[in-house]
Image: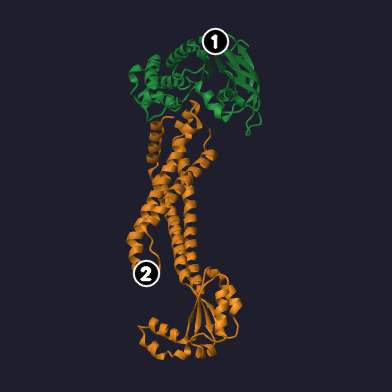
Chain colours: A orange, B green
Amino acid sequence: MRASFVFSEVVTGLRRNLTMTVAMILTTAISLGLLGGGLLVVTTIDRMQDLYYDRVEVAVFLSEDVSANDPECSAEPCSSLRAELEATSGVESVAFESREDAFNRFQQIFESQPELRELARPEALPASFRVKLADPQRFDVIAQEFTGRAGVDRVQDQGEYLEELFQTLSGVRNATFAVALVQALAALLLISNTIQVSAFTRRTEVGIMRLTGATRWYTQLPFLLEAVVAGLIGGVLAVVGLTTAKTAFIDVVLADVFEAGIVPRITLSDIAFISPVLLLVGAGISAVTGYVTLRLYVRT
Amino acid sequence: MIRLEHVSKAYKTSTRPALDNVSVEVDKGEFVFLIGPSGSGKSTFLRLLLREEMPTKGDVFVADWNVGKLSRRRVPQLRQRVGCVFQDFRLLNNKTVAENVAFALEVIGKPRHTIQKVVPEVLEMVGLDGKSERMPYELSGGEQQRVAVARAFVNRPLVLLADEPTGNLDPEISQDIMLLLERINRTGTTVMMATHNHSIVDSMRRRVVELQLGQLVRDDARGVYGVGR
């Protein structure tokens, strides 16, 4: 097969339907960009989960009696509770926080809000065990085991708050993927349509090619490559778009959030990491759509 | 070279078969006119030979291929050995004369040096050697048909099929095209030409196969168009 011949056919084809080609490329680019955006959100969620669940603790708040009378956790029931917690499988570490410690921490946290600090009394704060779990999902076991025990006031999972946060983020991710999917559908139809138009405008050539005994590949490869080239260009545009969005928008708007370490930064290497995926998906989907279209609409 | 054995072809959209139990044999190097009124099945006949259509019944043989049973993959091999020419020339208007002829070789992957050698030869043979860089629309109808013939012949096919090649041309020009087809026939290529043109058939005195309503009604070794039944 002569590459130069196929190549020139591809270029002619793309130029002949310029508006269609541009529409096809843009739709593909938007679709892939959204897909890439979704993937970046997924990466971010994963990283945030690592980051946060690492810090998450289960708090076992102790009763008023224990809080008031056992600041060292040396007497019953506190000491045996501690021993039991430590012996529970999946528990990484147990730290006792006395009423005094809790009060100090409270003062620290609300350093900038003197009114709150004024109001707080040590008596209002319970002592607690801060339990770190190897697997944060194991919270239920601790809750079941220790809720209602003598000396225990209640068991609280900080992870619950995170759940809500991550649910919101998952929602963002799902929405992004949904829009990407709709766009992808539009892109598919456009690719299919462009190939049909392309095949129609070149029906004389194709007819002659068939009658002179050109193989199926020779006849159809230019159309297929047209789609693949458009898909690849779409992929490149998507990567460029994501990079631009990151540097010009995300980095600026979320600068403070990144700085504080609340949300891990999206890096250029993250984009570099997903860009082969986008290019492959772009080229792959175009190729498959092209192939199916040619099968359905173009005779051999 | 061409053999039809009890071939019928029915189109889904029609109640009457386009070809009805037709059996013909054409030897290598023969020149055959395929005649009959419009709708008699001439075009279907030619399309079957190219495997543009599949026979509903019977077997079609071209060279050693059983055309109806040819796998999809091997259809191009058949078509590379069967040239064809049409009433409407079917040239590519954005390519020069030489490019039009070269196109037929490019698309079957012939190497460039072969193309550069063969194209001028065949253009000279059809009498267009001075016009290789012209565009099709700069040529007369007769010249355009010569380009089409050159394109059909450039790969030296075993069989040349012509579907009303003179249908758009005046009698004098038609005569030139016939001389060209005769010349091609003399190189050993089997020529099969579907036509309505009485005077050409009458003057050439070649084998005539006549179809009517899809049936073979006449096969004369040296026939004329109208009489001789």
Under mark 1, the amino acid is Arg
Task: Please give the residue where the numbered disc 2 appears in the rendered image.
Answer: A257
* Front residue of B204 and B150: B150
Q: Say yes or no: labels 1 and 2 on the same chain.
A: no
Q: Which residue is drawn at 42% across and 89% down?
A: A120
Foreground disc of the pair 1, 2: 2
Residue A266, compared with residue A148, is above or below; it is above
Q: x, y (%) of residue A166?
A: 48, 68
- Residue A143 lies in what quarter of the image? bottom right
SS under mark 2: helix
In the depicted structure, whether residue B221 falls above or below residue A219: above
In the depicted view, which residue is nearer to us: A63 or B78? Answer: A63
The amino acid pointed to by label 2 is Val
Q: Residue at x 44, y 57 (%)?
A: A34
Label 1 neighbour load within 10 Å: few <14, some 14-19, many 20+? some
| Residue on which the image places disc 1 | B206
Q: In which quarter of the image is the C terminus of chain B?
A: top right
Is residue A60 at least partly visible in the picture? Answer: yes
| Residue A218 disc label | none
Residue B112 in picture, x, y percent from top left: 38, 24
Residue A265 sits above or below residue B45 on the image: below
Do residues under tags 1 and 2 come within 8 Å of each other at their CB atoms? no
Q: Residue A227 location in percent, x, y?
A: 44, 42
Category of crowding for the residue at label 2, using alpha-carbon neighbours closer than 10 angstroms: few (below 14), some (14–19), many (at least 20): few
Looking at the rendered structure, the secondary structure element under dot 1 is loop
Closer-to-camera residue (B64/A71): A71
Asked which quadrant contains residue A121, the reply is bottom left
